[in-house]
Amino acid sequence: MEWVETTAKTIDAAREAALDQLGVAADEAEFDVIEEPRPGLFGRVRGEARLRARVRPAQVRPKQERRRRGRSDGGAASSTTESSVTPTSTNDGAADASAISDTADTVASDKPKAQRSRRTTTTTSKREEPTMTNDERPESTVSPQEVGAAAVAFMEGLTTAFGADAEVAVEVDGIELEVTVTGSELGLLVGPGGRTLNAVQDLARVAAQRRLGDHETRLRVDVAGYRQRREAALAAFARDVAGQVVTSGTARSLEPMTSADRKVVHDVLNEIDGVTTRSVGEDPDRRIIVDPV
């Protein structure tokens, strides 16, 4: 993932500007501070904060081996070993889509003692795991085409599970992946305000990560052209607001938006003379202020 560089009066302001450019939340990005403001005379600050940021590469989650211990009955010692069953299915996407519910059922059925044992083991392994810097992290050998194929398989399985008649395709542009789902009666996969679609997109990323491991790609899922229509509507709205701000000469505060929607508005208004934009607040209430120049 390519780095973006931002400058501002403070480190926090530079970090927020980088998040707006990347279109992700703070926990999905990593930062590298290049220069910090220096204290001057009489409490003044000299210079500006400068940092670079990029989307955090996905990391492989270690699989924990689950074991069950049988209880001995009376004086006879007996033990049972739980055999692991690997689901076989011709539809790999459906298997990935059901992985989360299968894991939840397994955890709920385990005994409390086994749960405490696993929690202790996991905590110990996390403490012993060495922390790797960005330079020490091994370079991913997974190609964007492989990630796209895994995401397509997941979405095909998901649409089949929903009983929808849909076609899934992927477009690869460097590390940018665009998975499109077309068909009829796909509203359930979009949800109010696109919130279900955002969750589906996150699940597709997790499914690709579980199957392929660490990779540096940016995956976006669009169902029934919702994101295209949303971006077009946001762009028209942003231009209308810019016209009002230029005419009135007063700033305009927009409603809270997701990081992806804020990025669309920033990109559109950056091309318009007479206005400038900035983001204020914290997610989920973070919003854009459109100021006259």
Image (cartoon, rainbow, N blue to C red):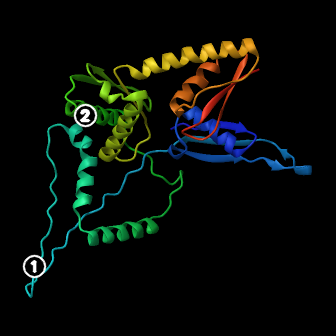
- Kind of residue sitting beneath label 1: Ser
Q: Would residue 4 be visible to someone looking at this image?
A: no
Q: Residues within 10 Å of mark 2 (few under 14, many from 20)?
A: many
Residue positioned most to the bottom:
75
Q: Which residue is mark 1?
A: 78
Q: Quadrant of residue 93?
A: top left
Going 10% across and 79% down the picture, which residue do you hit?
78
**Residue 22 image position (x, y, % from top left):** 55, 34
Name the disc covering residue 222, or none.
none
Q: Is residue 122 above or below residue 228?
A: below
Q: Would residue 223 be visible to someone looking at this image?
A: yes
- Kind of residue sitting beneath label 2: Leu
Left or right? Give the position of 65 relative to 231. left
Left or right? Give the position of 169 relative to 141. left
**Residue 46 image position (x, y, % from top left):** 84, 44
Locate the C terminus by quadrant: top right
Q: Is residue 60 above or below residue 70?
A: above
**Residue 56 image position (x, y, % from top left):** 50, 44
Left or right? Give the position of 271 relative to 192. right
Which element is circle 1 on?
loop
Q: Which residue is mark 2?
A: 158
Which element is circle 2 on?
helix
Q: CA distance from mark 1 to mark 2?
A: 43 Å
Q: Quadrant of residue 271?
A: top right
Left or right? Give the position of 124 relative to 73. right
Q: Nearer the viewer, residue 56 or 3?
A: 56
**Residue 162 image position (x, y, % from top left):** 22, 31
Q: Residues within 10 Å of mark 1 (few under 14, many from 20)?
A: few
Going 14% across and 62% down the picture, which residue do you hit?
83
Residue positioned most to the right:
42
Q: Nearer the viewer, residue 185 or 137?
A: 185
Q: Is residue 51 above or below residue 228?
A: below
